[in-house]
Image (tube, rainbow, N blue to C red):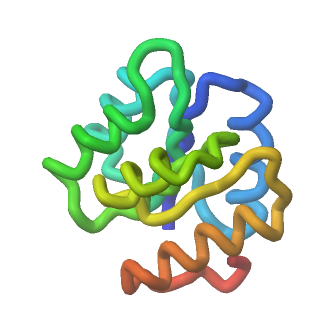
Amino acid sequence: MNALIIDDNEMTRSVLRAMLVRSGLQVIGEASNGNNGYELIMKLKPQVVCLDIVMPDISGIDVLKQLRAELDRMVVLMVTSERSVETIKQCLSLGASGFIIKPFNEATVLKSVRDAMSRAGMTIPNGL
C-alpha cells in the first residue's frame, strides 16, 4: 500500500509521513502545493492521498474535483483545521473518502485512514 501527501506545511507533511510509514504504508511522494500534488498523483497513481484543503495555489477541493473525474479507486483524505459543515459536505459530495482534522494525533490519523480504506474495500496493512 502506498500514499502521497499534499500539504503546504512542511511540518504537517513530516508528521503525516512518519505516522503513515510506521503504520506500514509506503509514502511514495509529497508535494507542497495543489498543482504539483495533482501532477504527482497522475504520475504515481497512489492508493491513498492525504490532501490539505487550504493551499496557496489551488485548494485541495479543486484538486479533488480534478481527481474524481479521472481516478475512482483512490482513498482521498482531506487534511484540514476547517470544521465547517458546508466544507465537509462539499468534500464528501466530490468524493472525499474521509477527513484528518488538525490538530491530529497518530491514533486519529490511522483510524481515519483505516476507516476510509475499509469503506473502499481495500486490504488494510497489518500495522494500520
User: Measuring 80% from the left and 53% from the top, which residue is drawn there?
Assistant: 104
In the picture provided, is 70 more to the left or to the right than 60? left
Pinpoint residue 101: horizontal percent, then vertical percent: 69, 52
Q: In terms of image quadrants, where is residue 65?
A: top left
Numbered marks: total: 0
Pinpoint residue 82: horizontal percent, then vertical percent: 63, 41
Quadrant where the C terminus sits is bottom right
User: Measuring 69% from the left and 41% from the top, which residue is drawn there?
Assistant: 81
Pinpoint residue 124: horizontal percent, then vertical percent: 55, 82
93 in relation to 124, above or below: above
Pinpoint residue 12: horizontal percent, then vertical percent: 74, 36
User: Measuring 40% from the left and 51% from the top, which residue is drawn there?
Assistant: 91
User: Measuring 39% from the left and 21% from the top, which residue is drawn there?
Assistant: 58
- Residue furthest left as drawn: 69
33 or 54, nearer to the observer: 54
In the picture provided, is 95 more to the left or to the right than 89? left
- Residue furthest top as drawn: 57
101 or 31, nearer to the observer: 101
1 in relation to 92, above or below: below
